[in-house]
Image (cartoon, helix red, strand yellow):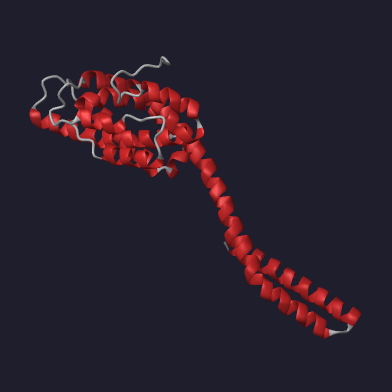
Amino acid sequence: MIKRHRRFIILAAIFVASSALIYFVHYRIFGNPYHIFIYMIGDLAFLPLEVFIVVIVIERILAYREKQALLSKLNMVVGAFFSEVGNDLITSLICSMENRDETFQCLDIGQDWTARDFKKAKVCARNIRVNADCSGLDLAALRDFLIQKREFLLRLLENPNLLEHERFTDLMWAVFHLAEELEARPSVQNLPESDLAHLAGDIQRVYGPLVSEWIRYLEHLKSKYPYLFSLVLRTHPFQPQPSPVVT
């Protein structure tokens, strides 16, 4: 730290001395201090505007471009998650939802959806509720699926870009916690109501954020990759008869 400050002071002294030397040469050649001071004041008057353009405007443009590049990398990670884990997880947990018909209607994404439609769907996703008794949910199959995908999820967490995506990181931890809860039980059959209610809370912690991130990802696909969005429109589970076949 001391060396860095010393280096800064030395550089500042060199620049100031260089400027003074140039002004001195100017004075020795033209012998007119009036021109020196009038141009110096003009340069000083322009300095705040120059600082604004360079430091604020250009820096913000560069920061915006950097943020867009980072978001692109993050969406690649999110896309890999949904392709490998997220889509199947959404499908397997659908049977645990309350008010399924109403939720299906809200989340049945269409080709003509606008930003307003996606916003409504995000609100709907946040309000998803899970049955306290986990009725209709195959907990054993869910446990086996999450254990099978654990290595993939761990590799995703190693991606340093996820540090910039707090929501998705929280979702990943919620998925890991649900997997650990299910794996910790010798059997997930004939569990008491109190334990089913506890697991329903863990599923609730996963499902709402999971569908919310799914909606955000689809909004990104619609604007950037319409051919991928088209496939999701045909195969997503929130519709009566999902099918990849184009009709």
Do we see residue 84 in this rendering?
Answer: no
Image coordinates for residue 86, horizontal then vertical, percent: 35, 27
Going by the image, does 75 lie left or right of 145? Answer: right
Image coordinates for residue 12, horizontal then vertical, percent: 69, 69
Of 192 and 85, the residue lying toward us: 85
Identity of the residue drawn at 34% across and 20% down: 148
The answer to which image quadrant residue 175 occupies is top left
The answer to which image quadrant residue 187 occupies is top left
Going by the image, does 241 lie left or right of 113? Answer: left
Residue 243 against residue 16 in the figure, above or below: above
Do we see residue 141 in this rendering?
Answer: yes
Image coordinates for residue 140, horizontal then vertical, percent: 22, 19
Identity of the residue drawn at 73% across and 69% down: 15
Going by the image, does 215 lie left or right of 66? Answer: left
The answer to which image quadrant residue 209 occupies is top left
Image coordinates for residue 11, horizontal then vertical, percent: 70, 66
Identity of the residue drawn at 27% across and 22% down: 92
Going by the image, does 187 lie left or right of 43? Answer: left
Q: How many marks?
A: 0
Quadrant of image for the C terminus = top left
Residue 165 against residue 20 in the figure, above or below: above
Of 116 and 205, the residue lying toward us: 116
Identity of the residue drawn at 16% across and 26% down: 134
Quadrant of image for the N terminus = bottom right
Of 38 and 31, the residue lying toward us: 38
